[in-house]
Every structure is written in C-alpha cells, then in structure tokens.
Amino acid sequence: MRLYDDQLIDISARFQAEMKKGLSAESSAAAAVKMLPTHVRSTPDGSEKGQFLALDLGGSKFKVLQVKVREGMGVRKGGVEMEEKIYPMSKELLNGRAPELFDHVSESLKDFLHVKNISLDKKHPLAFTFSFPCEQTRLDKGLLLSWSKNCRARGLQGKDVVQALREAIDRTGGMDIEVLAMVNDTVATMMTCGFDDQYCDVGLIIGTGTNACYMEELRHVDLVEGDEGRMCVNTEWGGFGDDGALNDYITEFDQDVDATSINPGKQIFEKMVSGMYLGELVRLVVLKMAKLGQLFDGLVPDALRTKGKITTAHVAAMEEYKNGLKNTRDILVELGLNPSQDDCIAVQHVSTIVSFRSSNLVAAGLAAILTRIKHNRHLRALRITVGVDGTVYKTHPQYPKRLHKVVRRLLPECQVRFVLSDSGSSKGAALVTAVAQRLASRKRQTLAPFKLSQEQLQLVKATMRAGLEAGLKNKGPSAVKMLPSYVYHTPDGTERGKYLALDLGGTNFRAMLVKFKKGLQNNTRLYHKIYTVPLEIMQGTGEELFDHLAQYVSDFLDYMGMKKAHLPAGFTFSFPCEQTAIDTGILVSWTKGFKATDCEGHDVVNLLREAIKRRNEYDLDIVAVVNDTVGTMMSCAYEDPQCEVGLIAGTGSNAYKKAETSETSKMCINTEWGGLGDDGSLDDIITPFDAEVDHNSVNPGKQRFEKLTSGMYLGEIVREVLLDLTRGGLLFRGREKQCLCFDRLALLQVRSILQNLGLDSTCDDSIIVKEVCGAVSRRAAELCGAGMAAVVDKIRENRGLDHLNITVGVDGALYKLHPHFSGVLQETTRVLAPQCNVTFLPSEEGSGKGAALITAVARQKRDR
Ligand code: BG6
Ligand code: BG6
Ligand code: GLC
Ligand code: GLC
C-alpha cells in the first residue's frame, strides 16, 4: 500500500489518459472515468442573488436548507445566510424503491418549510445537490448513470433524477417548488469556495465517496456543442480503475472490499480512497495479521471478522496526534480485545498506511487535473485554488496536511491553495441556481406573451368567425376578404386530358404538366420543374416578373419537348385576387414579400398573357386562375369527396371553404384569412416582437394574422426574440451576432442557422433557441387551429348540423416540414370545434393538380 513518488507520477499519468478518454466523443461511452459535463459555465461573480431552498442528498447526511444570497456582498459577512436541518436517512430507504426514497426527501422538505415557517403558498426555487454520477443535458435534467457509495434505490438508474424529485414533490403536495438546478457535490463545493476565492476552479470531495470536478475548456468537451469558454466537468474519478487501469496497484484487501460491496467491480479508485471504505481496509489488514499470529497473541476475535466494525471515524481517532495510541487501545478494547502496547502501535501503523495511501492517491489524481488545467491554459506555472469537502478531509487529523504536501511535491511549479468548504455544498448549489433562475425568469417573461390561454384562443376563433361573416356581407374592403373563386364543384373523376399548371406564390415557382387518363380515378401523371424567383424580380417591375414567368414556362416546355403544343393552362396565383370569372383575377394587393410594381389592380391572367405574347415563342390557353387554397382543396377532393376546405400553412397562411351563400348557388370562397387583424382586432395578442416584424415587412399593417402564423415570418419573430434575449445577456454571452442582426431567419433556415450560430454558441444557448422556436411555432399552430375551428363550425352551423365530418386539404412547408405544427393544429381544432370531426389530408402534388382539375372542368363548360 505504500506508494512512492514515481508510482504516484505513474498513476497521475494514467489518470490523465483516462480523463482524455472520458472527454472524447469516440471513447467516452466506454470510459471508466466518465468526465460528465455539468452545464455550469462559470464560477460565482458576485451578481448572484435570491432565496433558495436546497436539498443535499448523497453524503453522510441528508439535509434540507434555506439559503439567502444577497447581491454583490461576495466575501463580505452576511453575503449568504443559511439555515439547515438534518433529516434521518435509513438503510431501508437507501436500498428500497426510489419513489419511496424521494417521497421521504420531499416530505422532509415539506416538514422543513413548516418548521422554519416558510410560506407554502409562495413559489420557491430549489437547488438540489445530488452526489451521484448523472449524465446532464442541462442544469435541471440528469439521468442517473449508476448508484455508488451506500445507495442503490431501485427504479432510478437511467431515469431523470430531477423529474423523479418533481414527481415526489407533486405526490407530497401542498408546496409550490421549482427545481431549477441539480449539481454534484464536487461542483457545489467548487462554487461554495469560488464565492470567496476567484481562483477556485477545482472541487474535491473526500468523504463517504470521493470525486473531483474542474473547469475544462469547452472545446475539449466533445459531448457539449460549442467551443468558446469553459464548463465544469464532474470527473467521477471514483470509477478510475474500473477497466483494470489500476490492477497492478490493487491489493488483496482492496479485492475483498470490492467483492463484499454493493457494487462489485465498480468505483475501484473510490474504494481505495474514501471514507466508506478506509475503516474496512484497516479491519481486513488487521484481521489478516491476527490470523497470521502477528497480533493479539495469535487470537482472532469475532468482532474483527465482522464487516463494518472498524470505521473511518476509528481511523481518524487512531491517528490523532497525542491521543492516537490511547484511542487505538480504546477502540480495540471495545472490540473485545486485550491489546498489548505493540499491538496498538502496529494497528495504528496499519491505519496510517491505509489513510496515507488514500491521500497519496488523491494527490496523484489532483496532480493530473492541475496539470491538465495548466496545459489547457498554456501556462508554465499555475495559481489555483481547490475547494474541498467531505468527512475524511474534515475529520482526519493528518489528512489535509499530507495531501497538500504531496500535491506540492508532485507539482512544484504550481501554487495550489486548498480551501475547506465551510458551509457544505448548498451555498454553491444555490449560487448555481441563482444564475439559472435569472435565466429562467427572463426567458419566461419574454416567452409568456406567446403562450395563449384557452380563453384567448376562443376569442381568436370568435374574431375569425366575425371576420368571415363580415367579409361575406361587406361591400367595401374588409380584413378577411372572402373572395369568390368561380369554382362551383369539386372534381367528379371524369376529368380527362393534358394540362399545364403554373404555380406562383409559394416558396418557389412551379411549372407542371398534368395528364388525367381515362378510366380509373387517381390515374394521373405529373411532370414538374421548380424555379426560384429571385428577390429582385419579386420586388422589381411587374413586367419583369411576368416576363420571368414566361421564360420559366418556355424552359419547361422545352424540357418536356412540347413547345408546339397549344395547351390549356391553369394558373395558381397565391395572392388575393378579385375574380369576376374563372379566368380573370384582379390582384388586390401583394402579400408574402412580393411587391412588383404595376400589378395591383390589374388582371394577372392578362399580365401573363401579355408576357407570353411579348415572348412570341409559344402559345397557352389560360383557362383558369386559382388561389393555392382552392387548388389544394380540389387536389385533395379528387382523393376524398368529403374534402371541402383547403388550408395553406406555408410561406403564407390562408384557408378556403366551400361557401353556402344561398341554397341555389354554392361557390367556393377564398377567405384570405391572413388579413384578419388588419383592423386591429388581434392587437391584444400581438407582441412587441410581432410588431417589429410587421414594421420591417414590405406591407406594414397588412396580413397581421399571416404574420403570426406563416412560415415567412416565424423565423423573423424568433430572430427578434433572440436579439432581445441576447441584449438581456441571456444568450450568446450577451454578444450580439452580426448574423442575428442582419440575416433573415426564414423557417427553413432556422435549423441551419442554429448550427451556424451553434458553432460558437453553447449548448444552453441552443436549448433556449429551441425553446423560443417552440413557443413561436406552437402559437402559430394554435392560431391556425383557432381559425380552422371557426371555419368548420361555420360550415356546420350553415348546414344546421349538430355534428360535422369534414376533410381539410392542407399544403405548405410549415405544415409538412415542421415536426410539431400539424399535431398542435389538429389538437387545437379538435378542442375548439368539438362538434366537428376534422380530418387533415396533406395534398400530395401541391395545388397544381387541383388547378388542372379546375381547368379541365372550366374548359369543358366553355367549349360546350
Ligand atoms: C457535504 C456535502 O458538505 O460534503 C455533501 O454537502 C457531500 O453533499 C459531502 O456529499 C461529502 O462528504 P460526506 O463525508 O458527507 O460524504
Ligand atoms: C404548394 C402550392 O403546394 O403549396 C403553392 O402549389 C402554395 O401554390 C404552397 O403556395 C404553399 O407552400 P409554401 O410553403 O411553399 O408556401
Ligand atoms: C461518489 C459519487 C460522486 C460523488 C462522490 C462524493 O463517488 O459517485 O458523484 O461526487 O461520491 O460524494
Ligand atoms: C397569402 C396570400 C394567399 C395565399 C396564402 C398562402 O396569404 O395572400 O392568397 O393563399 O398566402 O400561400
């Protein structure tokens, strides 16, 4: 058990290699030393403040605490006030079922609130010191990897510990607790000591178990995105040797301790070092000596054969300066022995060797960590503080001195200060929580206006309903325009022939050839090509825009080898048009970023015809102009005759319904619901971020509902929120990024932009960004759902039905590509229109097929 310096240097080098393994993405899964990211990024800076509850589970004592942190007080007295109560923790609970263990934890918490007269009605933020290895993906989430020390409660391994605690708190009931952070005891210790000493970048525990954490450069932590700054890594060094790395240092006594432990083969280093095992090691050595006849006159007393009879407290007592020998005698007598002076000296010596080995091993591990930090920072010498806690360090009289001495001997170039954590780990846990709380409350405040209540959604539904009615009645302009489409029937399957479909207004311009074959319905063939309309064309002159379209068509006809054919064509034009017939459409106003001049107020069919004429290269018979909602509904109605509504959740947002204006004439109506709110009716739910997006758009004050719900704007709203959070110091470490300021963040780009920003952003940043995206897109889906509920309920009521079964044909990138949009939309529609059973049917080939079907019908009629 004696370890010389060259051996310690060897062990230290092995540990350095293990750390590397644990940090690297390729080897971390199998590494014995787990090197767990903690999501703690900085040591305290004095700006922390607040009042917190704290739980401390995993050391020799289970405690509940209240911690008050006053801002800016730092080192000064009164900066932190703490009250604590120790609660009993039985072996049965530690070895029983995890829910029961956590019930005890949360009941103790409730008792503490009661005893300390802390209000049960108020919400209390809570910090949780949990001293076991957890894989954390954020501060308030951590999966338990394995139990260690004296705990093995069933049913928690692999599960989120914070969640388990929350559930227990719910079961106990009667408290309003927000668990904001879970930290390992090493991390909490580092933070506690870091409050008083800015050089404290290492936390060390030598208690029931042993472990260390330190501030690592983020670029070395493969498991966490980002490469700027630092993150505290919990080494879980207790597992050092679990893969055999220490086999040549393992003694028969270590093997014995391991074999009779609750986790054989695990925590090999911990079993050589920590308080839970030191007494046992001494007992086994003494027992062997007794068996060999070297002690106690050859007697082997029963007490010596019993596990746990010598404890770490005994070890500490035996090594006391003056009383050590007397204590040793007392201990041995208590075990029923009658020791000679030589026996006492020998047993004391054993104890010294065992505890010395422990401090030597800790020194070797610490030397490895400090060396790594020194290299990371490219320093030749290092000034650093190690925060320490744990019963062995605190109660063993010689331990600290020995440890300090060896560390300094192994690292002569480093100036290492050891600071004992005076107040346990909870102060540090509270400091971590204070930062988390500031973040959470700021984030909550920012995102709160995006969370709509059921009442608000009901109101939006009612507003939409009123908008639909007003649009139908009003002669003059109204927010929801309710434009007639001159489409009277859904397809009946008798449509035949070859048609060209042109499609402007979505993400891209599309040209398509559609062939309906005789016989079977669904026997349709489609050929298409996609063209991107450049921004300068979208916003140039009308002539340029339509010339461009004519050129795309020419290219497509070439591509199909059909330049000579004089084809009937349908034109999907996804903007609001005043129609007087199926083949005329006066553009009311551009939407979705288009603003080509000299188009508004003109018939877009004419504009296209003229462009084709100017080109003088091919001929088209433009039979119908249709909105994309109409095209989508027709396309879906071809598959499902119950389809009577079309919905677009794409670049723009719009719904379309078969209207029942009078009994005799039923015509499909393009609602243009994107305009809802243009009269101020949605002002209550419009956030400052929405207002900013509107303000920066090409059509301020217009399409307010669309600007809350469609793909063209969601990214922009997210960008505004991110900018605000960044300015508030919550994101990207407060540094405004150029790209955030100038780039447009359209929906499809969010992911890739996240990655771009993610390169030098942190994992927490990414989580916040994702949360913002989630809040913004959920609201969009809910609003769409509220709108759809209004539409289907109106249809139901028009028909005087108690219950309506209806299908909605849907298209658009937002609906099709967003992972949650469709789900939230459907759920909201279901809740807000409980008397309707709405099936959402995604349109397969876009609105082109629908436009072709309309063209087929219109031509038949015209030619008849
Ligand atoms: C305490 C911490 O101060 O130190 C505990 O609050 C930690 O969480 C402990 O586990 C380590 O010491 P021991 O000896 O109680 O295991
Ligand atoms: C397509 C239609 O299928 O969906 C387009 O043919 C429509 O006209 C589009 O505008 C909506 O989707 P996005 O996401 O491209 O705007
Ligand atoms: C055990 C735990 C570890 C903890 C240490 C000290 O090694 O696995 O998480 O830090 O004990 O309490
Ligand atoms: C815009 C257009 C509308 C179209 C919708 C979806 O709201 O004004 O006509 O249907 O976008 O593309």
Image (cartoon, grey):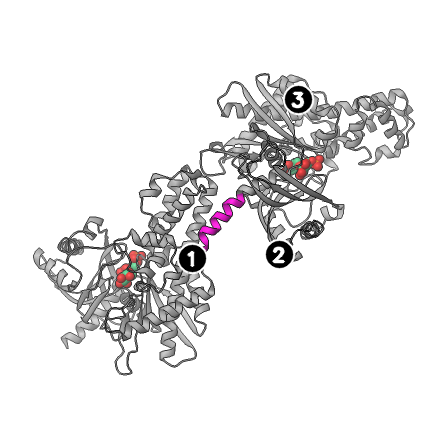
Assign a secondary structure to mark 3: helix
| Label of residue 778 in the image | 1
User: x, y percentage for residue 811?
Assistant: 33, 61
Q: Residues within 10 Å of mark 2 (few under 14, many from 20)?
A: few
Q: What is the distance, in whole Å, between disc 3 and disc 1 at their CAs?
A: 56 Å
- Tell whether position 317 is magenta: no
Of the image marks 1 and 2, the number of the one nearer the N terminus: 2
**At 70% from the left edge and 43% from the top edge, which residue is drawn?**
84
Assign a secondary structure to mark 2: loop
User: Which residue is the site of mark 2?
Assistant: 121
User: x, y percentage for residue 637?
Assistant: 31, 70
Which amino acid, mark 2? Asp
Circles 3 and 1, Cβ within 8 Å, touching? The answer is no
Instruction: Please name the predominant secondary structure of the magenta segment in the image.
Output: helix
User: x, y percentage for residue 606?
Assistant: 13, 63
Q: Dividing the image into four equal quarters, which quarter contains ligand 1?
A: top right
Magenta residues, start to end: 436-448
